[in-house]
């Protein structure tokens, strides 16, 4: 620029001249000139603008289309104003935050811009959304945020006297938001009560985190001396205090501090100066909350302590893990932070059982735990040496089923297997007294043990136990007062036996037993006994399943409708009765399956939706019941399957996705439970099928892969489980089909081979389930092995109840009409 | 954008700041730049927070401003004892703040080179005049810093931060007479340069 160079040289000349003449001037007197005033006096306007007008500037000012109303606060970092839109769009009050920051560093400025981009996309229900951002002419960065009206979280908790559970609920939401932000690469670094407001949304307390990322973006905050002393110093992690690089775990620390304060009402790190507080953060442990709040739960303390570990590697490694442990605590499950001994789990189960109220003798309880511990230790000799007295056995039996649910939810079925067997041995050798009361008790004991064994797939042992129970009960038949109870138990036992015999393939025997059970139940109904409806339903329900499996649909339909009727009338008087709601749910599911088999998909969906409502109702009363969550999961799976059949892919995705969500949660809660895991893979498969039909191959591939991963894991763990092998085959085929769609034939072939291998042996068995035969035939056909597939297809054709239409579809698809006739003409029988 | 690379940049330790000061003291430009950034923000922050505590439009006391920053430094864990160096930097930061304001809003449009004496009769002075004047002053000071840093430092501290000559003498651990001479000399050079250009 001409000005500059010209002026520059002129200036240089002047300067040199000044220097020269300076040496001649004596400086013994003070000269009075403008410089004596100082810059503030000499350049008042400029000075004002630089230092003082920062505030006055902004009120009433326009930031794009927002007009500032008033200042509502100022922190060390910047000022906050309320503002509203005045471009006619909609009248919304927002908050504008202006940062005081100056940055010489171009690198940092660039990063700032990138960050703003990410922040704008950080959308989460618990994070205040960034609406707009910009830069003023003076170089100040400003952000427009939604204006949140609400109390700070510590004030809110105190004001409303929140319970521990309520606080945990809030923390769970906060953790969710923090985890989300971390996953996007944003760390808060200044989590403290002032930054978390509680908003009232539809009369629900919703925590909203402010300044997410803005604290992060404010490099001045990092770099200033004042950074050490800003705001509430007690929430910074040790690494932040030391000014070291920090990551998401610094936020975890702050969350720990927050929890300490919310639960105890006292500051975690208190002191009279920032230095003092920082010292404590670096070197001292916090007080146990139990000192302030008596009987503060140990697990919660452990969670907080884990967050407050001085070294980041010893804390929860992610906000998600913290959230999960908080949820675990809420549900009464052991927390992950410290691996719980199984004993504690069992102890809690023992505590929950209603019998604990009745039995006061603590030695019984200890006796029980003793037995469990020794069984757990698998030391059979020692276990045998313990002579469990009668009372222990009673308690044990009653607890057995409850424990089973507990432990199976957690996947510790192995433990119960041993225990159940031991119990059975003991029962078999015991000489019980000859009175009726005892007989009933022991029949019940046998029934309990039998049901556990059945759940472990020990079918024969279970049958034996049930038979024993039946023997005992039949001896009671004629004796007066226990008659009704005995009849009910017999009905149930016969029903159970029928189910097991059906599993073994003894269908005729099963039918007989079902009919017997039914007649007993009806006997009770005639007598108008109290629990007769219950017994009737208990007998009808498994029978209707049995009939459907045998394709006796007419009979099944009658019973199904009867069962639903029973549940409806039972619920009339008592709408919230948990047992009946469960039965209603089961009946609706069964009904749904019936309609699926009848290809009346819309009616099936109707039933399933009703079943869903029922489950939701039950979940309201027992929010964290794992088994209810599983029921909810199953219903979603079922509905998605129905919609898939109906070709309503959007709905399929909707429900399958919900199924996935639930399945993932359940897998975390009970990682050892294969039933939940399998249901999860089913959800993914439904998702994959829907995406495939919607022509979204990438999403489909993703979903199928996820399902395949799960089934692979399970099939590898149980190579003898035929149905798992079938699952593996189907999932491999699904995945292979997708790969083929994408043109990756070679890869597809790999997976078809996997499918073939997993089914080969199983499908070839003469009494193989037709499902496996079907899968195997399909695998062969896909690989072009038509001739090999034919015998299996014939089997399918000749199996009663196998849908003719699906068979014909396959024939058509693979153009097998002629080859089929050929086979037919040469041999009349399938191989 | 990955989490790791992102974190590693915002790197400040108490030790680090101390190091910065030491390096800046030794003349390392990058360290000096970083420190200036810090001080800049610091001064502005203090100024604003103090402004808020005033009910009326009292003029901000520049000396107090800088002193407060120094106090903060002492209170924190940063181990730095060279008050002289710190304050010199603070003064530069002050100047930078004003200069920024001068450069903003297209103020430096006037092609004419103005001196205070020329315009002193025309009151009130416009902000553009102030801006232009400061801009020129800055150019001269840069030259002066190269030529005789101590003179420039004394000038900065007195003019921008409002320290008395006595205080400056104490800071530099020199006699009042010496400091006085430096001050007068600096002023002379500046004024003369203004006049001659």
Image (spheres, rainbow, N blue to C red):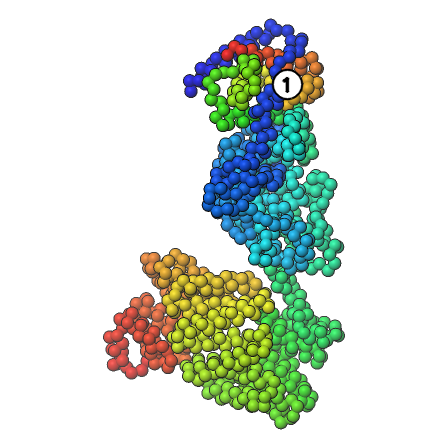
Which residue occupies 43% across, 67% down?
A640
SS at mark 1 in the image: helix
Q: Residues within 10 Å of mark 1 (few under 14, many from 20)?
A: some
User: A831 or A447, which lies in front?
Assistant: A447
Badge 1: chain ID: A
Residue plotted at (47% across, 83% down): A559
Judge by depth and name the residue closer to the eye, B20 or B158.
Answer: B158
Residue A654's x, y, as percent?
44, 62
- Determine whether A394 is above or below A241 in the image: below
Query: Residue at 60% across / 47% down in the picture?
Result: A251
The residue that label 1 is drawn on is A37
| Residue at the farthest top position | A24
Q: Is residue A795 visible?
A: yes
Foreground residue among A50 and A445: A50
Residue B50 seen in the current view: no
> Where is A487 relative to A278, above or below?
below
Residue A507 percent location from the top left of the image: 46, 85
Q: Which residue is rendered at x = 30% and y = 67% of the image? A: A784
Q: Is residue A425 above or below residue A704?
A: below
Query: Which quadrant is home to the C terminus of chain A?
Result: bottom left
Question: Quarter of the image holding residue B142?
Answer: top right
Image quadrant where one finds the N terminus of chain A: top left
Q: Quadrant of residue B24?
A: top right
Residue A525 occupies which quadrant of the picture? bottom right
């Amino acid at each position: 620029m001409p000005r500059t160079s010209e002026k520059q040289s002129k200036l240089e000349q002047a300067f040199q001249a000044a220097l020269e003449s300076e040496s001649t001037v004596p400086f013994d007197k003070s000269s009075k000139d403008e410089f004596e005033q100082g810059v503030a006096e000499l350049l008042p306007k400029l000075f004002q603008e630089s230092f003082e007008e920062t505030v006055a500037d902004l009120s009433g000012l326009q930031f794009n289309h927002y007009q500032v109303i008033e200042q509502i606060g100022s922190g060390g970092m910047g000022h906050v104003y309320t503002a509203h839109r005045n471009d006619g769009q909609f009248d919304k009050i927002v908050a504008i935050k202006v940062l005081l920051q100056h940055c010489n560093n171009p690198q940092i400025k660039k990063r700032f811009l990138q960050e703003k981009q990410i922040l704008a996309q950080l959308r989460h229900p618990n994070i205040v959304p960034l609406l707009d951002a910009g830069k003023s002419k003076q170089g100040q960065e400003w952000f427009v945020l939604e204006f949140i009206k609400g109390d700070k979280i510590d004030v809110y908790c105190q004001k409303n006297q929140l319970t521990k559970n309520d606080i945990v609920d809030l923390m769970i939401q906060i953790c969710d938001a923090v985890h989300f932000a971390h996953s996007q690469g944003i760390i808060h670094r200044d989590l403290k009560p002032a930054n978390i407001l509680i908003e009232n949304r539809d009369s629900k307390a919703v925590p909203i985190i402010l300044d997410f990322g803005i604290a992060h973006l404010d490099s001045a905050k990092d770099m200033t001396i004042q950074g050490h002393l800003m705001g509430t110093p007690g929430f910074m992690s040790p690494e932040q205090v030391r000014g070291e690089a920090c990551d998401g775990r610094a936020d975890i620390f702050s969350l720990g501090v927050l929890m300490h304060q919310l639960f105890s009402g006292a500051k975690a790190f208190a002191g009279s100066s920032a230095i003092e507080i920082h010292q404590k953060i670096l070197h001292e442990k916090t007080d146990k909350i139990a000192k302030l709040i008596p009987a503060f739960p140990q697990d919660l303390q452990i969670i907080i302590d884990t967050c407050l570990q001085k070294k980041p590697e010893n804390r929860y490694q992610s906000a998600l893990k913290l959230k999960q442990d908080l949820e675990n605590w809420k549900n009464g499950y052991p927390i992950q932070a410290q691996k719980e001994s199984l004993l504690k789990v069992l102890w809690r189960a023992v505590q929950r059982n209603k019998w604990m109220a009745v039995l006061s003798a603590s030695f019984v309880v200890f006796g029980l735990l003793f037995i469990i511990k020794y069984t757990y230790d698998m030391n059979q000799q020692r276990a045998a040496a313990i002579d469990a007295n009668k009372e222990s056995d009673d308690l044990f039996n009653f607890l057995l089923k409850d424990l089973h649910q507990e432990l199976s939810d957690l996947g510790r079925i192995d433990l119960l297997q041993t225990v159940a067997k031991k119990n059975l041995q003991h029962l078999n050798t015991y000489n019980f007294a000859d009175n009726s009361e005892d007989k009933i008790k022991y029949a019940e004991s046998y029934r309990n043990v039998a049901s556990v064994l059945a759940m472990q797939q020990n079918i024969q042992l279970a049958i034996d136990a049930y038979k024993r129970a039946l023997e005992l009960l039949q001896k009671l038949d004629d004796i007066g007062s226990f008659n009704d109870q005995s009849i009910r138990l017999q009905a149930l036992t016969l029903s159970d036996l029928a189910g097991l015999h059906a599993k073994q393939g003894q269908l005729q025997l099963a039918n007989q037993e079902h009919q017997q059970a039914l007649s007993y139940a009806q006997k009770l109904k005639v007598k108008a006994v109290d629990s007769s409806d219950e017994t009737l339903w208990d007998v009808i329900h498994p029978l209707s399943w049995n009939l459907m499996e045998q394709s006796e649909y007419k009979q099944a339909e009658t019973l199904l409708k009867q069962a639903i009727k029973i549940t409806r009338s039972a619920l009339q008087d008592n709408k919230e009765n948990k047992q009946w709601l469960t039965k209603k749910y089961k009946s609706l599911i069964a009904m749904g399956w019936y309609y699926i088999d009848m290809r009346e998909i819309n009616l099936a969906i109707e039933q399933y939706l009703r079943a869903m409502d029922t489950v939701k109702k039950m979940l309201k009363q027992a929010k964290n019941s794992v088994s209810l969550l599983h029921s909810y999961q199953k219903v979603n799976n079922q509905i998605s399957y129905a919609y898939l059949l109906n070709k309503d892919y959007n709905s399929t995705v909707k429900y399958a996705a919900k199924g996935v969500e639930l399945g993932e949660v359940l897998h975390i809660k009970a990682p050892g439970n294969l039933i939940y895991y399998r249901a999860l893979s089913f959800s993914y498969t439904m998702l994959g099928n829907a995406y495939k039909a919607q022509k979204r191959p990438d999403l489909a591939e993703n979903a199928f892969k996820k399902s395949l991963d799960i089934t692979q894991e399970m099939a590898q763990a149980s190579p003898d489980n035929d149905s798992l092998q079938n699952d593996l085959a189907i999932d491999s085929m699904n995945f292979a089909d997708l790969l083929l769609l994408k043109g990756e034939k070679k890869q597809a072939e790999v997976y078809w081979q996997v499918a073939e291998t997993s089914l080969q042996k199983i499908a070839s068995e003469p009494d193989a389930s037709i499902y496996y035969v079907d899968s195997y035939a399909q695998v062969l056909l896909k690989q072009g092995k038509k001739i090999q597939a034919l015998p299996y297809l014939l089997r399918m054709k000749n199996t009663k109840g196998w849908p003719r239409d699906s068979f014909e579809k396959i024939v058509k698809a693979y153009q097998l009409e002629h080859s089929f006739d050929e086979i037919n003409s040469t041999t009349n029988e399938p191989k | 954008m990955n989490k790791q690379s992102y974190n590693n940049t915002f790197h400040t330790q108490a030790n680090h700041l101390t190091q910065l000061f030491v390096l800046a003291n030794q003349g390392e430009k990058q360290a000096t730049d970083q420190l200036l950034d810090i001080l800049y923000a610091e001064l502005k922050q203090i100024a604003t927070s103090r402004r808020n505590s005033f009910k009326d439009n009292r003029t901000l006391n520049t000396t107090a401003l800088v002193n407060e920053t120094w106090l903060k430094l002492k209170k924190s864990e940063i181990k730095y004892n060279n008050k002289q160096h710190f304050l010199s930097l603070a003064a530069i930061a002050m100047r930078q703040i004003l200069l920024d304001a001068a450069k903003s809003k297209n103020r430096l449009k006037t092609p004419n080179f103005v001196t205070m004496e020329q315009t002193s009769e025309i009151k009130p002075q416009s902000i553009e005049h102030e801006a232009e004047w400061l801009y020129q002053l800055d150019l001269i000071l840069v030259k002066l810093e190269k030529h005789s840093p101590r003179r420039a430092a004394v000038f900065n501290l007195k003019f921008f931060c409002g320290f008395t000559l006595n205080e400056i003498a104490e800071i530099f651990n020199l006699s009042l007479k010496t400091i006085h001479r430096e001050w007068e000399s600096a002023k002379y050079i500046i004024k003369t340069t203004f006049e001659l250009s």
